[in-house]
Image (spheres, grey):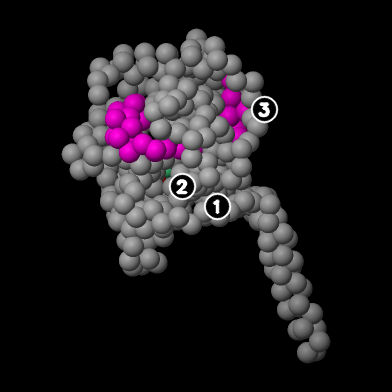
Amino acid sequence: MVSSYVIYAAVPISVVVAVGLIRKWRSRSWAKCSSNTCLRGKTFLITGANSGIGLETAKALVKRKARVIFACRNIEKAKQAIAGIRKEQPIGGELIPMQLDLASFDSIQNFVGVVKAGFNKIDVLINNAGVSIPLKEDLKTKEGFEIHVGVNHLGHFYLTYLLLDLLKRASPSRVVVVSSTLHERGKLDFSDLNLRGAIEEAKKGKADRHNAGYCNSKLMNAYFARGLSAKLKSSGVDVNACCPGFCYTNLFRYFVRWYHYILMAPIALFFMRSAKQGSETVVYCATDYRIEGHTGKFYRDCAEYNSKYPFTKEEETKLWSISEEMIKARKPVKN
Ligand SMILES: NC(=O)c1ccc[n+]([C@@H]2O[C@H](COP(=O)([O-])OP(=O)(O)OC[C@H]3O[C@@H](n4cnc5c(N)ncnc54)[C@H](OP(=O)(O)O)[C@@H]3O)[C@@H](O)[C@H]2O)c1
């Protein structure tokens, strides 16, 4: 009798231990940011700092005594995130909540006005916020752009443009663009950047396994980092893109149904990083002194990553000028 209880208990315990060990073994290949430089006096601005990778990046920076501006769509969520960090780390750093909706050019302009009234320099801008939403939802930004193009790419394009003088003043300074290796699945059709065709297909029920809107916006992020780094060469502002890896965060909230938790559990356990593990490469790009002066690169696992995407100068220039036109058409571009 007693021995059957022992067997019943031993089976689940061994499974948990085995899963734990396999996960530990898997995570050995996920790099960690080894630099621990004190960041006192430096100002970091993170978009989407209330959740997932942005939140974990903010925690790591506060631990290193930085001043961090939490640029969040929902100011209450920003305050809650800050209160949570303060419980874990009662002293050190400075945490500032601010409202920023990247789906609205007015919000971006107002936000930059507030930043400029309070700060004369930004040492590191981390363009982290992002959405991944099924195309069939046909969501748009306030200006009418497809949601991934509008938030993940154009919103950050406009924000960075408006903050350039503060970044130049802080030189040597950095812009970190959080992209994804899914940019390699992106395909830019300049006659339909807002994906009218793909949205109509998705509405008819045609499956879109990799979300073209998301992949394209991550490709635009990678191109933006390359284009901006070229424009800012010798200004002392380094611009790099990075991929945090496949992480368990709120990003997939629009796709996940209850049964996915069961089906995806083995994948999540063996292949998905925690948000903290994902933040390591972002923190590396934002703080590691050993890559100062490196610009126009793509990083993954705290190391340079050779993208399989066939980047061309022609596509980069075209995307840059169309992005400028898209913004100018809705908003007079002035600094
Ligand atoms: N998770 C992954 O596997 C993975 C892999 C590769 C790359 N990435 C990239 O990592 C970045 C962070 O994503 P995550 O995984 O940490 O997801 P997340 O937990 O969903 O965080 C996304 C953040 O972006 C914010 N955001 C969304 N729309 C916004 C808007 N219009 N204006 C301002 N902020 C907005 C969200 O605010 P709310 O909380 O208010 O929605 C949230 O704070 C994204 O750029 C994503 O593409 C993630």
How far across and how far down the image is residue 303, in percent? 61, 42
Q: Identify which residue, 317 or 252, lies in the foreground.
A: 317
Q: Amino acid at mark 1?
A: Cys
How far across and how far down the image is residue 177, in percent? 47, 35
Q: Residue at x 18, y 39 (%)?
A: 117
Q: Residues within 10 Å of mark 2 (few under 14, many from 20)?
A: many
Q: Secondary structure at mark 1?
A: loop
Task: Give the residue furthest to the left.
Answer: 117
Is the CB–ligand 1 distance for label 3 below 8 Å?
no
Q: Which mark is residue 287?
A: 2
Q: Amino acid at mark 2?
A: Thr
Q: Residues within 10 Å of mark 1 (few under 14, many from 20)?
A: some
How far across and how far down the image is residue 101, in percent? 32, 36
Q: Residue at x 43, y 21 (%)?
A: 231
**From which residue to which does the magenta span run?**
158-187
Residue receiving disc 3: 308
Q: Residue at x 64, y 51 (%)?
A: 30
The reply to whether the magenta stretch includes residue 175 is yes
How far across and how far down the image is residue 154, in percent? 40, 25
Lower sequence index among marks 1 and 3:
1
In the image, is residue 201 above or below residue 117?
above
The reply to whether the magenta stretch includes residue 115 is no
Q: CA distance from mark 1 to mark 2?
A: 9 Å
